[in-house]
Image: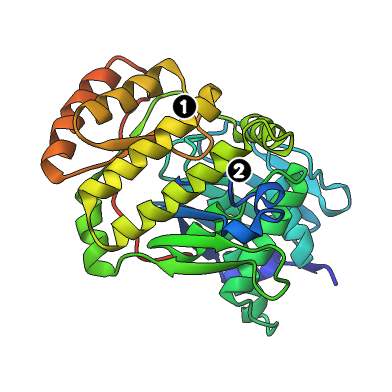
Amino acid sequence: MLRSLTVFLTENPVEASAPCRIDAGGTWDIKALALPFEGIGPTTINIALNLRTRVTLSPYKSNWIKVSSEGFRRSEAFHRDHVRLDSRFGLFFAAVTYFGFHGMAIHIHARAPVRSALGGSSTAIVALIKALAKIRLMQGGKNLSGRSILHLAYHLEDGVSGGHCGIQDQAAALYGGVNQWTWHYGNRRALFDRHPLLDRKGQKEFSKRILVAFSGERHVSSRTNRKWIKDFLAGRTRSGWVEANEIVRRLGSAIKNRNWLRAAGFLREEMALRKRLTPEALTPVTAVLIRQAEGSGCGARFAGAGAGGCVWALGEQEDIHRLRNKWKNTLASIRNAGILGCEVDPAGAR
């Protein structure tokens, strides 16, 4: 049943937020890779950052839905009978359509830069579904569990994107913290196992040993992911991806044991493999940032699918301090580039 929220939101404005992420092992959460090779335990690691995305729902004219986002000059509005799911904000219209709502304006505010490879669209869709679920509950409907929100967010994004979407970005947004994931799409009862690597104290220690920088270059992940999947399915890069999966498993153990030096070494190993498997994921700027990190005794990798966006580094505190100055100098002359002030966010969507 379709339901107008024009009056309801006038009296009850609703908002929700979720953290973005940095990661290692990404791509193994994509079904095309993970499902056939479930036997090796496909794994990824992600770290939620307190650069949160906030979604605000406010009243709009009945029968219409409007979406706007900071960082995008134009908003989009459609009548409920003519909603476009292939537009810039099609994913968010898809979520509202699923819930059967209209008469609402959605505004997205992200603290992370636009298209910075920090899982922006996935973070926003989790926050939006959280907000829509709040409304349904307030109106006497059934509550959505965390796993149900994740299930819906992933399948909506995977469907709208044409089937090249992973699930780790939505998972980081929902749960927060520092987690290692094992993906098993063949299990109809649970798509994943979550392994928290650090408690609150460990997360604070970890925050002092990471550095995140935006290269100033916006990335588009879908094109890169499609190439990686194509090469994997054809067998051209598969053995390298399997090797990378094992390295990320060891990286998780090092982080859990708070052996930061060893963890930085595994991050360097994964990056070395990525350079060979996915050279198109590096740009001249991100390649320099990674070289500087490794020259400072740290490990570093591009966030997400790379090809612009952010780079993050891990190392001992003194090494990170030295690297901060190098990265500042490198990025000083690049428009919109710079180091992002952030730390681990222990909380997920709320």
Residue drawn at point x = 62 percent, y = 80 percent = 138
Front residue of 145/26: it is 26
Residue lying furthest left in this view?
Answer: 318
Front residue of 304/217: it is 304
Residue 149 vs 57, above or below: the answer is: below
The picture quadrant where one finds residue 225 is top right
- Left or right: where does residue 191 sit relative to residue 290? right
Residue drawn at point x = 56 percent, y = 41 percent = 241
Query: Visible in this render: residue 49?
Result: no
According to the picture, the residue beneath numbered tag 1 turns out to be 275
Q: Earlier in the sequence, mark 1 or mark 2?
A: 2
The residue under label 1 is which amino acid type? Lys
Percent from the top left, x then y, of residue 184?
A: 64, 63
Which of the labelled discs sits on residue 68, or is there none? 2
Q: Are marks 1 and 2 in contact (CB under 8 Å)?
A: no
Count of numbered labels shown in the rendering = 2
